[in-house]
Amino acid sequence: MSSPQPSESTRVWFKSSYSGGNATECLECAHTPTGALVRDSKRPEGPALALRAGAWRDFVENVSAGWLTPLPPAP
């Protein structure tokens, strides 16, 4: 039997410790029973990207290893 998904009001969203406390370009994450949700901290009512646990783990490992490079600034 699977666990029920937490309601929006009970989800705990958090920012990365690397966010620096500024108000720009920050993501928030929330754990779910099957993975994680990611959203723009400036638009908490906006859409959230849902990732399965394995995809989230791979993403975090690749970022931590420095294997992902940032995009150049937009013109």
Image (spheres, rainbow, N blue to C red):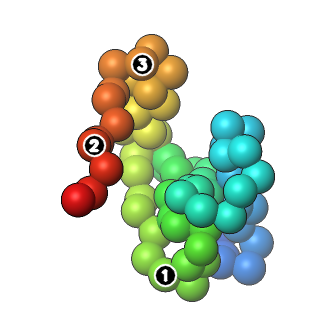
Real-space CA distance between mark 2 and mark 1, rounded to the nearest whole angstrom = 25 Å
The residue lying furthest to the bottom in this view is 45
- Front position in the image: 1 or 13: 13
Disc 2 or 1, which lies upstream in sequence? Answer: 1
Residue extending furthest toward the front: 75
**Which numbered disc covers residue 8?**
none
| Closer to the eye: label 2 or 1 | 2
Label of residue 66 in the image: 3
Crowding at dot 2, Cα within 10 Å, few <14 / some 14-19 / many 20+, comes out as: few
Q: Mark 2 highlights which residue?
A: 72
Location of residue 67 with respect to 57 vertically, above or below: above
Q: Nearer the viewer, residue 48 or 74?
A: 74
| Label whose residue precedes the other's in the sequence (2 or 3) | 3
Residue 72 can be seen, yes or no: yes
Q: Is residue 61 visible?
A: no
The type of residue carrying mark 2 is Pro
1 or 3: tag closer to the N-terminus: 1
Q: Position of residue 40 (x, y in %)?
A: 52, 67
- Asked if residue 30 lies left or right of residue 17, the reply is left
Which SS class for mark 3? loop
Q: Which residue is mark 1?
A: 46
Say which amino acid is labelled 1.
Gly
Q: Position of residue 67 (x, y in %)?
A: 34, 19
Asked which quadrant contains residue 54, the reply is top left
Q: Nearer the viewer, mark 2 or mark 3?
A: 2
Spatial CA distance of label 2 from label 3 is 16 Å
- Look at the image and tell me in which quarter the N terminus lies: bottom right
Residue 36 vertical position relative to residue 54 in the rendered view, above or below: below
The quarter holding residue 16 reads top right
